Image: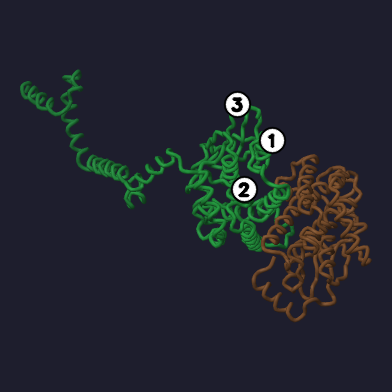
Amino acid sequence: MSSILIEAIQTELGATERWPDDVRLYQPYPNEQIVFPDYASCLSVKTFLHMCGLKFGVELRTNAEEMSPSGKVPFVKIGPFLVSEIEPIIAFINTRGFQLNQDLTDTQRSEMKAYMSLVESVLVNSELHLAWLNPEVVNEVTKMRYGSVYAWPLDKILPWKKQREVRSRLDSVGWAKKSIDEVCDEISTCCQALSERLDKQQYFFGDRPTELDAIVFGHLYTILTTSLPISRFAEVIREFKNLTDFCQRIDQKYFKDRQNDY
Amino acid sequence: MAGDGEMELHVWKGDWNLPSVDPNCLAALAYCKFAGVPVCVKKTNNPWKSPSGELPVLIHGKVTETSINNIFGYLRKQNWGSDFDLTNKQSADVIAYTSLLEEKLLPALLHSWWIDGKTYVDVTRPWYAKAAPFPLNFFLPGQKQRQASDRVYTSKGIGENVLDTEIDAKIYKEAKECLNHLSYKLGDQDFFFGSSPSSLDALVFGFLAPILNAPLPGSQLTNHLRGCPNLCSLCTKIIQRFFPPSAEDIDTHKKEKQEEKKMSDASLDFPHKKRNMFLSAIFAAIAMVGYAFMSGLVQIEVVDEEKESSPSPAKPSEPSNFEFQPLFTEDDEQQEDS
């Protein structure tokens, strides 16, 4: 969300100080509070920052969602700027001269955008669907976690309000009425496409990572490792061997080897 | 092929030299043409024909498919496809670009058709009100507008501190980027994947052709799309090659033009000029006659009646002849009596 003026100011200030030392990424508490769709987007952003080799600190806030300029987590504070959500963050960091996709041709960049929106539309929507519309998961996991940091009666009201928001969002894109089988089919089609694209390469576009790799890793890794009452999504993804290998590779390289936190 | 009856495809009718005005209908029509599906196209303009309330709808025997993805999927299962020559990687690209179109371009398209005030009032609402059948035409445009605004605003911003204008700026920016990406992907090829069209070409055509051909006043999308010549030529190529104007269309087009020529500019502004003149002449005549009766003529009549009624008891059986001539005869009789 930024007008041309704000973009101009961002570039101007960015020229003097490309990456300040006190960059902070704000997110809810990962062990107790965060819901897994949010966790996936936080992990995507962190992976992207690690891939760029940028240093940042993580700040845990119970009200990170309310602090965010767009109402979504995570958001980063870079100097005087607050930027939220993965795509604006990537665009912002690109204006600072850190780019992962400078070696790509225009066609490849266009394909990268297409696959990014595939992940955004299919994986994000199915995560939201599972987390907020599946009765079993909502009652056993999501509402408990989301409400855990608030006192009664807020711990009942806020999850209910959030659920309504998510339902209307999914309804507007025609996902609210999908059954779990249909959602699994969507994920399967999406993974099929990603798997074909990845093939036997190390990353989606050759041997250098791009933001697509960060996003795919963030979502697939979250779905594979989160333990939920319903684990059908993970089963669907495990059918694609090269995708699970890909997740392990990135996990090893950017998190385990460098002892970074998730 | 199942072979149970012929396939029917119900769509919105066309305008502005397009076979249909709705993106999804256009895409479905284009796909059928690409794959050579023997489908019977019905321009019903009635979304109540469809179980989901959306056109296009494909009816084949007992099967009814509504959304564009389901229609493509069904046709593919029936072995009617334009994508069989694609490699696996290209099929993956089709899926990815489909979601790019739906995520990035669709919101801006809906915005410029349904939410932009001027276009909605001048173009969209009159068009759908005219096209839809009787009871629907009153509420269909409003209903479709609500759906569009849901799709654009609810899915884009959940936070309360995001303004609608910010969302507008964002979706148009994304849509322009999306057009650029499509243009890069197409490059200087004939179609997205070489020399023969695929389902992606059908979808892109469905989205772009209305932006290009419809009279959207001052639309940012139209201007931006004109700046991507390869996408424009893709649209015109598809129209020329797969939708040549049929004899019927040419006839109706000619008739429309002739009618337009017949009507002068003034008669376009006042289509009921003659009728109005006639009515006002009648009104003036009635008013004048009424005034005449009220003021002058009425008295004369009353006098006449008194004259006639006082002697009339003598001859009560004759009032039917009471006009002009009997006056004299009666007078004569009276004179005779006296």
Of callouts 2 and 1, the N-terminal one: 1
Q: What chain is the brown one?
A: A
Asked if residue B139 can be seen in this view, the reply is: yes
List the residue tagged with mark 1: B77
Q: Which mark is residue B203?
A: 2
As drawn, which residue projects farthest toward the bottom?
A16
Nearest to the observer: residue B43 or residue B35:
B35
What's the colour of chain B in the image?
Answer: green
Instruction: Work out how far the residue at label 1 is from the one at label 3, CA to CA, in angstroms.
Output: 16 Å
Q: Please tell me if label 2 and label 1 are on a single chain.
A: yes
**Nearer the observer, disc 2 or disc 1?**
1
Three-letter amino acid code at the position of disc 3: Gly
Vertical side of A126 occupied by A204: above or below: below
Of callouts 2 and 3, the N-terminal one: 3
- Give the letter of the chain under mark 1: B
Residue at the image position 82 percent from the left and 54 percent from the top: A200
Kindly indicate the quadrant of the structure image that contains residue B283.
top left
